[in-house]
Image: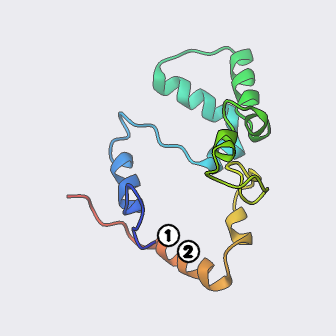
């Protein structure tokens, strides 16, 4: 919220991508969590690739949180092996895969500040 991150200020950084929707496809975790199959189709359409129903089902299955968390090629366990994060449930790269779980970690004051920040108008990039 203080813009003290790489590629910050965050909202303005993301806004830059949204302004190029003809060449950049922006998706949210919430969209993928709600209906991964339609997101797979949206990505395929954006890339100009046609997929069979079986392809969509296979991609949706293999990009589920549960499958990716168990897959060493996608779960960033090497971060634990190299000491970049601890190996506890709270410290793993892939935690729960639950939309809105941040609310369980923020105090009421932090939640209010975040929601206020989220709803502020984003300054134009020009």
- Residue found 75% across the figure and 52% down from its top: 87
Residue at 79% in and 56% down: 89
The percent position of residue 74, horizontal first and vertical second, equals 66, 34
| Secondary element type, mark 2 | helix
**Residue that lies at the very extreme toward the front in this rendered image:** 82
Q: Quadrant of residue 73?
A: top right
Residue 12 in the image, given as x and y percentages of width and height: 35, 60
Q: Which mark is residue 66?
A: none
Quadrant (top left, top right, bottom left, bottom right) of the C terminus: bottom left
Q: In this picture, is 56 found above or below 76?
A: above
User: Viewer-proximal residue, 83 or 101?
Assistant: 83
Residue placed under numbered mark 2 in the picture? 115
Q: Which residue is mark 1?
A: 118
Query: Closer to the camera, 71 or 33?
Result: 71
What colouring style does the render use? rainbow
Which residue occupies the extreme bottom position in the image? 109
Q: Residues within 10 Å of mark 2 (few under 14, many from 20)?
A: few
Q: Nearer the viewer, residue 86 or 42?
A: 86
The answer to whether residue 68 is above or below residue 98 is above
Residue 41 image-quadrant placement: top right
Q: Are marks 2 and 1 in contact (CB under 8 Å)?
A: yes
In the displayed structure, does residue 26 sit left or right of residue 88?
A: left
Element at badge 1? helix
- For image coordinates 40% across by 57% down, the residue present is 6
Nearer to me, 94 or 1: 94
């Amino acid at each position: 919220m203080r813009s003290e991150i790489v590629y910050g200020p965050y909202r303005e950084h993301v806004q830059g991508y949204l302004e190029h929707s003809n060449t950049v496809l922006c998706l949210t975790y919430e969209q993928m969590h709600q209906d991964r199959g339609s997101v797979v189709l949206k990505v395929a359409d954006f890339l100009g690739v046609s997929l069979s129903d079986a392809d969509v089902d296979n991609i949706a299955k293999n990009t589920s949180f549960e499958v990716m968390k168990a897959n060493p090629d996608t779960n960033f366990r090497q971060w634990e092996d190299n000491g970049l994060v601890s190996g506890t449930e709270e410290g793993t790269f892939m935690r729960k895969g639950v939309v809105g779980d941040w609310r369980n970690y923020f105090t009421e004051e932090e939640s209010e500040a975040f929601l206020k920040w989220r709803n502020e108008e984003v300054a134009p990039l020009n």
